[in-house]
Image (cartoon, rainbow, N blue to C red):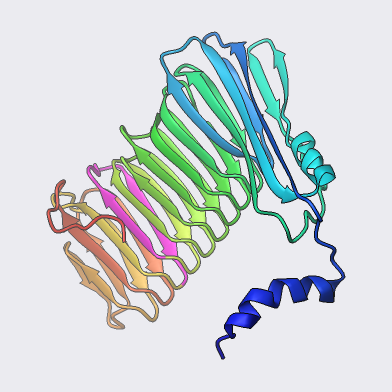
Amino acid sequence: MRPSRAARLFGPALLGVMLGVVLPASSAQREHSGVETFAAPIDTALVVDSATVDIRLRTGDVDEAHVATELRISGVGEQRAEQFIDAHMPTTEVTDGRITVTVDPGRLGFLGLGILTARSRLDLLVPTHIVPDLTTTSGSITIRGDLPNARPLYLRTATGDVELLGAAASVDVRSASGDARLDLVRPLERLFARTSSGSISVSGGARSVRVDTASGSVWMDNLSGDAEVATATGRITLTWDRLDPGHRVVVHSDSGRIRVTIPEHSSPHGRLTTIAGQIRSDFAGLVNDAGDTITLTGDGPEVLIDSASGDVTLEAGTWWDESDGGEP
């Protein structure tokens, strides 16, 4: 039953009384902002471990690395506000060829029901030649720019999301439940991605990919080489611009639907298998008596796709499909 207006208005106050929580008589607002600048010669490694603090990194026409800290909290008592600022302040260490930025918020405990806003973020402006290695727990990671020397660009988070708009030589993404979205302006040499429940989305391509997730979905287009993709329950959608003889594609899902699109002239060999789902292929092949396996009879790239209960589709596509609406 929908709560009454009175219940909606007085519910939080009553909850505070029931839990024995005393709301602060007066709340404080604290802010901190500051910028540090560091020399960053060619191949400098930038290692950031920011825990719950969001990371935003952008490359620019600069010769030094700039690290800006923005912290803000309101709606709590003065002591809690001061604790929040102190706990989220980064520490920086500079050694030969390496800049390390660390945030260790520790155990802040319960901030109180009166909290209104809290923001903690690191903004980084760096040269294109720098090599970042970024880690958070619940903080998000956002990158804008070109990082051609990053082999790989390491991006790690537990529950925070990862977003890259730009390019790198290669990327290594690891996440528990956070989603990863890569919008690339040129193909990666290699992509490695592993999540538990987070989804993975890649636009712009890669020459080699290895991706696995438990329950997240995988969506990648503009691929141009070998791929190994696995998921338990997530849906897999993959599209190739180029797939030559000698390339190998291996795709597995326990129950998720699999849709793979390769160039129409590919002539693949290999096998498509599903136990309880349906199979459809645009390429020449032989169907077994049970109807659960198609053996591809081409002489081109090897394609191996299997699903326990999900549908399997292998279709021929062109490099520009006007009917394709993009990522589902």
Decide which of 116, 125 is in the foreground and name it.
116
List x then y, in percent, for residue 275. Answer: 40, 78
Tell me which segment is drawn in magenta.
235-254
User: Is 80 left or right of 259, judged from the image as shown?
Assistant: right
User: Is 21 left or right of 272, judged from the image as shown?
Assistant: right
Residue 246 vertical position relative to residue 258 in the rendered view, above or below: above
- Residue at figure coordinates x 13%, y 49% from the top left: 265
- Residue at figure coordinates x 57%, y 36% from the top left: 55
Residue 289 vertical position relative to residue 88 in the rendered view, above or below: below
Residue 286 position by quadrant:
bottom left
In this view of the protein, can residue 152 be seen by the observer? no
- Residue at figure coordinates x 58%, y 58% from the top left: 196
Q: Quadrant of the C terminus?
A: bottom left
User: Is 87 left or right of 296, judged from the image as shown?
Assistant: right
Decide which of 144, 236 is in the foreground and name it.
144
Residue 69 vertical position relative to residue 93 in the rendered view, above or below: below
